Image (cartoon, rainbow, N blue to C red):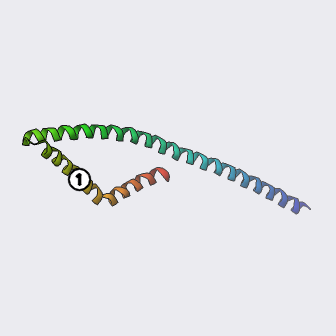
């Protein structure tokens, strides 16, 4: 019966080690998910604040630039038209570079996610 008891003890120890491994792995993944959610939340909040301030600054800059261009050409409508054309040109450039931008974002996210 010595061999059977030794096998029983060994299998019991293996089961205990397996359960401990599963519990540790579960805790690790819970912490990993928390880390990713925290990173996403902080990044999202910072981006919202930066985006809001940039939009506000861009609005004031656009109105001031359009007003200055309108004064230069003695035609306010022409100043606003020039500024709107510049904005649409920027939108077109961003649209053409969207694949490169998406790739850059995916690379940066994968660095954080798979560390």
Mark 1, secondary structure of its residue? helix
Look at 21% across and 48% down and name the residue there: 84
Quadrant location, the N terminus: bottom right
Judged left or right of residue 103, residue 70 is left
Q: Which residue is nearer to you in this view: 18 or 49?
A: 49
| Mark 1 Cα shell of 10 Å, populated few (<14), some (14-19), many (≥20) | few
Identify the residue shown where x is 46% and y is 49%. Answer: 112
Q: Quadrant of residue 48?
A: top left
**Is residue 3 or residue 112 the one in the foreground?**
112
Q: Position of residue 28 (x, y in %)?
A: 61, 48
Q: Which residue is mark 1?
A: 88
Q: How many marks?
A: 1
In the image, 105 versus 26, the foreground residue is 105
Taking the spot 52% from the left edge, 45% from the top edge, the residue there is 37
Whether 31 is drawn above or below 104: the answer is: above
**Position of residue 86 measured from the top left corner of the image (x, y, whole percent):** 19, 50
In the rendered image, residue 113, in percent from the top left (x then y), is placed at: 49, 52
Q: Position of residue 65 (x, y in %)?
A: 17, 40
Q: Is residue 42 visible?
A: yes
Give residue 63's quadrant in the image.
top left
Residue farthest along the right direction in this orientation: 1
Q: Which quarter of the figure has residue 53? A: top left
Question: Residue placed at 44% from the left, 52% from the top?
Answer: 109
Residue 115 appears in the figure: no
Left or right, 97 with respect to 25, comes to: left
């Amino acid at each position: 019966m010595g061999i059977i008891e030794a096998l029983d003890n060994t299998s019991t120890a293996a089961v205990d080690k397996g359960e401990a491994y599963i519990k540790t792995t579960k805790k690790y993944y819970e912490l990993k998910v928390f880390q990713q959610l925290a990173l996403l939340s902080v990044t999202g909040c910072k981006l919202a604040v930066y985006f809001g301030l940039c939009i506000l600054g861009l609005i004031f800059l656009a109105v001031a630039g359009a007003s200055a261009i309108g004064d230069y050409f003695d035609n306010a409508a022409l100043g606003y038209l020039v500024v709107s054309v510049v904005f649409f040109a920027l939108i077109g450039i961003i649209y053409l570079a969207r694949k490169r931008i998406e790739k850059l974002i995916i690379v940066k996210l994968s660095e954080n996610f798979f560390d």
